[in-house]
Image: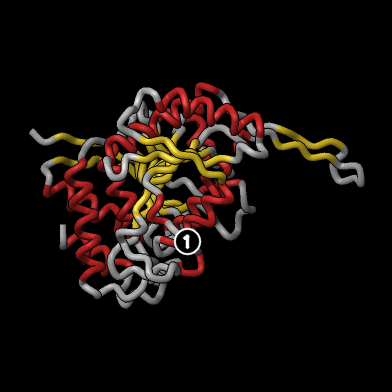
Amino acid sequence: MSKTYKVALLPGDGTGPEVLREGVKVVEAAAKKNNFKLELVDYDLGGERYMKTGEILPDSMVEEFKKFDAMFLGAIGHPEVKPGILEKGILLRLRFELDQYINLRPVKLYPNVETPLKDKKPADIDMIIVRENTEGLYTGAGGFLKKDTLQEVAVQESINTRFGVERCIRYAFEVTKKRSKHNKLTLCGKTNVLTYASDLWQRTFNVVEKDYPSVKGDYVNVDAACMWFVKNPEWFDVIVTDNLFGDIITDLAAMIQGGMGVAAGGNINPEGVSMFEPMGGSAPKYTGKNVINPIATINAGAMLLDTIGESQAAKDIDNAVIKALESGKIKSMSAGKMGMGTTEVGDLIASLI
């Protein structure tokens, strides 16, 4: 008897529904090939719901999500809603309340995908970034004193707990061990300036490293990491870092792998429900034009399947993406320049499963 997984769909705003539709198409093709089923449930979270009802994310819905095997997101961000309302009210709240404490970002240059880095090939750009996802500067700790006066003071605090840091680092060591590429895990921080938080990260890293003798530990300052990502990305295997630095270096990494059109990510709770998404935004100016690139969402679908235990189906999707790009039919990763429509790209990849 085939297994059934329950997946919550969050199409969201702008081009989110379009790319998610193609992601679902490919994931379902992989499920059919590998003899398991997906029970898909749609949720209308996003700008339209907020403008009609004033609701951002009902408490009851958060509890519902805990009963799913995974969540699949299109995009959040509406041009008629003030920036931050939906992002904080939906994305950040879900990360915190569902304890999705890992942001996992594979960085892979696919064949026939253009990178701005001269002479770099797919073999040179193949790393994974493990970003702590629920602590650091993004907890919202801090405040204002004498706001809107000449004496105004703004304080933003970075909260790092030994518990939160250790579980993130341990997860990264496990990823490195399982990946078994160069067996090197690089801690990215700023120990020369951010004395307290970076010291906690480094000391915890040193302790956890002793439990993984097959993995070589390494360290790089975040500013140096930005330089080496551009000059020598082949030096990196797996990188682990805090919330803020991870937010920054994953965007840089997306560009060297060919742009947001291929960059996928997962907000992971290894003991609970995780959410997968393309790294790009809602791109409202392309809504309904059938020109947005769905490959990042399709790659996010592969991550979803791998995380729920269907690793062969995930590999099938990755191989299909590679074949589609090797075919030369997809001319560019940029919206409107692919040489194919959004649905046609999805059809092509699904046909190659």
Which quadrant would the C terminus be assigned to in this image? bottom left
Q: Nearer the viewer, residue 330 or 11?
A: 330
Q: Amino acid at mark 1?
A: Lys
199 relative to 301, above or below: above
Asked whether the viewer can see residue 277, the reply is: no
Dot 1 corresponds to which residue?
Answer: 231
Report the side of 61 relative to 71 (left or right): right
Percent of width and height locating residue 48: 51, 53
Q: Nearer the viewer, residue 253 or 190?
A: 190
Q: Specify the farthest residue to the left.
A: 1
Identify the image's colour scheme: rainbow, by chain, secondary structure or one colour.
Answer: secondary structure
Asked whether the viewer can see residue 163, the reply is: yes
Percent of width and height locating residue 35: 11, 42
Report the side of 283 relative to 8 (left or right): right
Mark 1 crowd level (few <14, some 14–19, many ≥20, 10 Å Cα) = few
**Occupied quadrant, residue 43:** top left
Residue at coordinates 61% horizontally, 54% vertically from top-left? 81
Q: Specify the farthest residue to the right.
A: 150
Tell me how many marks there are: 1
Percent of width and height locating residue 243: 54, 39
Residue at coordinates 56% horizontally, 47% vertically from top-left? 222
323 relative to 81, above or below: below
Residue at coordinates 33% horizontally, 28% vertically from top-left? 213
